[in-house]
Image (spheres, grey):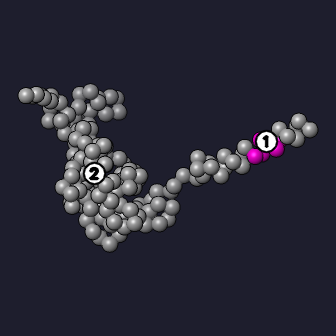
Amino acid sequence: MKLILSLLFVAFLTISIQHSPQGKEKDKFELKDDVFLVNGSAVFKLEHQGGMGYDFKLKTLDDKEVAFLKMMEFNDDKQISSSNPKGRVTYFDVTFYESGLKCEIEASFPKKFVGRDLYKHGIIKDNMPDEGAIKNFALINGSKFSPRAAGGTIIIINN
């Protein structure tokens, strides 16, 4: 009897885990022809800009321009390693058109990872820019790379 109850408990636990949010399959992120898709559904556009194609425009599916992501780079002695002998650091300087807010995010490759980060922060919801999410995104990310790129020394003067 104890064996049957134990087996039922294990079966119940297995079914519960499979149907819980943690047990579900993860979202599938894709980028096809500059359209970012989540589980096969189009969410927004992330279009290449410029000759090298490292800068991007974030747009709604209706082509409303939401943000410009400009790729920047600098060398940092603290980042030198055998796989990165020059200490190269890459990031995106992000400018949101409507609000004028700016921030900096780590450059992720392939490009779908940049889209995934923007999606997870809810920058575009229901094909519209979410200004609250944009404000939070800019506040959370701030300008963490440009001071290092400028030489790394920051002088703060308190009056």
Kindly report the secondary structure that dominates the magenta region of the rendered protein. helix
Asked if the stretch drawn in magenta spans residue 8, the answer is yes
Is residue 34 something one can see in this rendering? no
Distance of label 1 from label 2 (alpha carbons): 47 Å
Closer to us: 4 or 26: 4
Q: Which residue is mark 1?
A: 9
- Amino acid type, mark 2: Lys
Instruction: Reply above or below: 64 against 75.
Output: below
Q: In the figure, is residue 14 to the left or right of 117?
A: right
Q: Residue at x 7, y 28 (%)?
A: 159
- Residue drawn at x 23%, y 31% is 76
Single out the residue that lies furthest toward the bottom: 62
Tell me the element at label 1: helix
- Give the vertical position of 148 relative to 14 (above or below): above
Residue sticking out furthest to the left:
159
Secondary structure at badge 2 equals helix
Magenta residues, as a range? 7-12
Q: Residue at x 32, y 28 (%)?
A: 81
Q: Is residue 82 above or below residue 142?
A: above
Amino acid found under the numbered disc labelled 1: Phe
Q: Residue at x 21, y 57 (%)?
A: 99
- The residue pinned by badge 2 equals 135
Nearest the viewer among 130 and 146 is 130
- Residue lying furthest front in this view? 159
Left or right? Give the position of 18 relative to 158. right
Residue 102, image x, y percentages: 21, 50
Quadrant position of residue 143: top left
Q: Is residue 7 left or right of residue 31?
A: right
